[in-house]
Amino acid sequence: MKRNALYYFYIIALLYVIGAVFDGVAIYNHSKGYTKDKSGYVEILNFEDRLLNVEEWMFTGSGWDSKESTSTEKLKGSEAHYATAVISSYYFIASSAAFILMVLFIYWGGSNVFKAVGLSVITIAIACLIIGIITPMLEIEAFSTNLTIPLKFTLPFIGNVDIPDKVFEGRMYYYYQSKSVIDLIYVLLESKNYVVAVSIFVFSVLIPFIKLTLSVLLLLSRPFRNSGLVKKTVGRIGKWSMADVFVVATFLSYLSFSNMNTGIDTEANTLVGLYFFLAYCILSIASSHIIELAVRKEKEMMLKTDRRKILDK
């Protein structure tokens, strides 16, 4: 087996990409299905249909039983979608690990080992970036559970009027949002926040793709590797990518919303998309180091070749 030839890598990479597409589509579809069913669940239990609904105030029992049954069905559907998205994510992780291990097995000890591994890492990083930006990252919700409204009051000449408190059973939602990076950009454009929308697109989507594309060209093309301008561009463009900052900001939003003390219950849950985006950030950093090793390895090989030519003469 010629370990220096990259055509083995291209065959393995093609098989990996086909598998990654199937896994990615499943992750996206089920993540969107989760958001759709969860939004339906929240819509049934939103405060406008409960707190501002005369029937909820006047009648109890069968009305709530019907809502509870319908909302529970929606919630179970959303949980099933998310569980399937997580399982598909595990398949993606397993196939990515197998991809790297197979490349290492084939090219270990060869002159192209760093190049092949670097291309593998970049391929996985591109897949993680695509899934990360189109799949919901974070959901935030505000609600009350078994909201109790006291109905005791005092009337002139009558005194205290004691009416049983009104209890809205189950949850009552005031707010719910679940967005991906692309969804967030779309919402910002709709609300005419063009500067913020374009900034997020450029620094968290466009620049990462440009960096990964240039990294592939660096590994595959010797003229690119020998170009100081291209190397500087890749190094500088990585500093302009705000993907890691975006992840940190998302985690801060998660922590701050989860610990709000507003008199109502608040929750923030990280979703699949955030972990894929985080994986991209880690793989992007790793690919930069692997490219440096690949360039260094090539220089060492060229120096050895030049020395042999000199000795032969």
Image (spheres, helix red, strand yellow):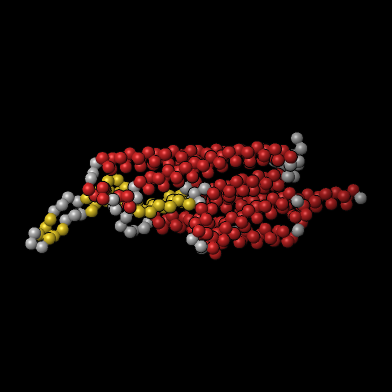
Looking at the rendering, which quadrant does residue 234 occupy?
A: bottom right
The residue at the far top in this view is 1
The residue at the far front in this view is 54
Residue 293 visible: no
Using the image as rendered, state which of residue 116 and residue 309 is in the foreground: 116
- Residue found at x 65% / y 44%: 120
Q: At which x and y percent is residue 48?
A: 33, 52
- Residue found at x 38% / y 45%: 41
- Residue found at x 32% / y 50%: 49
- Residue found at x 64% / y 51%: 287
Question: Which quarter of the rendered picture does the N terminus lie within?
Answer: top right
- In the rendered image of this protein, does residue 143 appear above or below residue 240? above
- In the rendered image of this protein, does residue 102 appear above or below residue 281? above
Residue 257 visible: yes
Q: At which x and y percent is residue 169?
A: 27, 46
Figure disc tally: 0
The residue at the far right in this view is 313
Quick check: 177 left or right of 164? Answer: right
Quick check: 258 left or right of 290? Answer: left
Using the image as rendered, state which of residue 16 and residue 196 is in the foreground: 196
The residue at the far left in this view is 157
Quick check: 4 left or right of 276? Answer: right
Q: At which x and y percent is residue 254?
A: 43, 54
Using the image as rendered, state which of residue 275 and residue 118 is in the foreground: 275
Q: At which x and y percent is residue 95?
A: 59, 38
